[in-house]
Structures are given as C-alpha cells and as structure tokens.
Image (tube, rainbow, N blue to C red):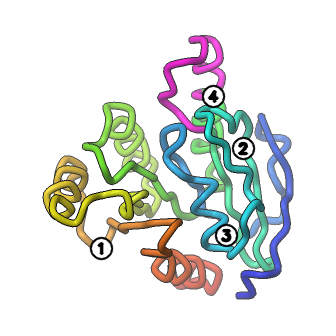
Amino acid sequence: MNLHNVEFLVSAVERKQYPKNKLPEIAMVGRSNVGKSSMINCVLNRKNFARVSSKPGKTVTINFYNIDNKINIADLPGYGYAKVSKQEKDKWGDMINEYLENENHASVIFLLVDSRHAPSEDDLMMLEWIRYSGRPFYVVATKVDKIKPSVKEETISNCFNPLGIEKDQFIEFSSEKGTGKEEIIKIMEDLSAGYC
C-alpha cells in the first residue's frame, strides 16, 4: 500500500454523503483534542493533510480520506468537549451514531484515548457501543511521549486497566515520536489485503 498516494474524499454530515467506493474502512473516534488528525498525519507522513487545531471541537463533520484506492479512513467528530452547546453535542452524537450504525462502513474502529489519563466516562461509553457493534477494534493511547519516564508504567496501567481489553488491542502511540506507527500501518495493510 502506497501511503504517499492519499486523497481527501469528502466531509459528510449524513449517510447519503458517505463515499460509495465500498473499500475497507477504518473509523477513528475519540474525545476532542485526543489527536486523531495528528495520528492521520503521522501515519501518512504528512504535516497538514488532516487539519489539526489547538482548539478542541474543531472537527464538526466526518472527514473521509482514501489511501492508494485500497482503504478509507473516516475521522469522526470529537466527543466530550464541554465548551459547545448541548444542541451541538447532540448533533455530533447523532452523526457518530448514524455512521457506526451503518453496516457498510467501519471495518475496524480505532478508539483514541489520552494515555496520560484514565479513560473518561465518555470513552468507556464509546467502548461499550463499539463492543455492541461487534466490529473489530483497537484502543490507541495517544501522547505517550508526554508522560514522564518515571511514571510511565503506572500511567499507562491506569489508562489500560479500566478498559477490560486484551493487550494486543491496545496500542501506545505518539505522533511526535512515531511510537506505534508501524503497528497502525500493519493493521491498515492487513485490512486492505483482506486478512483483518
């Protein structure tokens, strides 16, 4: 799979706008500012392909990307950001639910959580929804480079233990250092080859 052959497909707010190419698809979900766009840019070796903002809640649509005409990535709106109206939160929630309820999308789901903190109530609720959907999934613990080495083992344990998942479903990731990048690419390659 040629990671340099990438294309932005569409920003969608409802099902009828989703891509129709029927390729395998990885959905990325997580709290606002958890690092979804940074992860996409890191994996694709691009600086600004997926727009990164210092302001949480910036992604208000589902952004679809195509890699080498073999796989799609769907970057879903961040959840859990307090400084937006309840109406806006509900709209984002409806958008995420509509996407995840569509059986023709999301071959694999990446749930991104901040490695520096225990999973939030929103994270755990999203994980339960993902489990209920029956789709394969991985939890990607972002920003591991920001943890002090002296407390890293304890911090990662506090992030991992509440999830109730297997170790091979948990990926430590840093967009700054590239930690976990090869694992992510391997999952993408396996999915595009039909092995995942």
Which residue matches tag 2? Answer: 62
Say which residue appears at 45% left-offset and 79% top-offset. Answer: 183
Residue 189 appears at what percent x and percent y? 60, 84
| Quadrant assignment for the N terminus | bottom right
**Residue type at tag 2:** Ile
Residue in front for this viewpoint, 91 or 180: 180
Kindly report the distance in space between the C-alpha atoms of the residues bearing marks 2 and 3.
16 Å
Q: Earlier in the sequence, mark 1 or mark 3?
A: 3
Say which residue appears at 16% left-offset and 63% top-offset. Answer: 150
Q: Earlier in the sequence, mark 4 or mark 3?
A: 3
**Residue type at tag 3:** Pro
Q: For mark 1, give the secondary structure.
A: helix
**Residue type at tag 1:** Asp
Residue 128 appears at what percent x and percent y? 35, 42
- Residue 90 is drawn in which quadrant? top right
Taking 140 as reference, is 100 above or below it?
Answer: above
Mark sitting on residue 168 = 1
Question: Which span of residues is magenta-colored?
Answer: 78-93
Q: For mark 4, give the secondary structure.
A: helix
Which residue matches tag 3? Answer: 24
Which residue matches tag 4? Answer: 92
Taking 191 as reference, is 57 above or below it?
Answer: above
Q: Callout 2: few (<14), some (14-19), or many (20+) C-alpha neighbours within 10 Å?
A: many
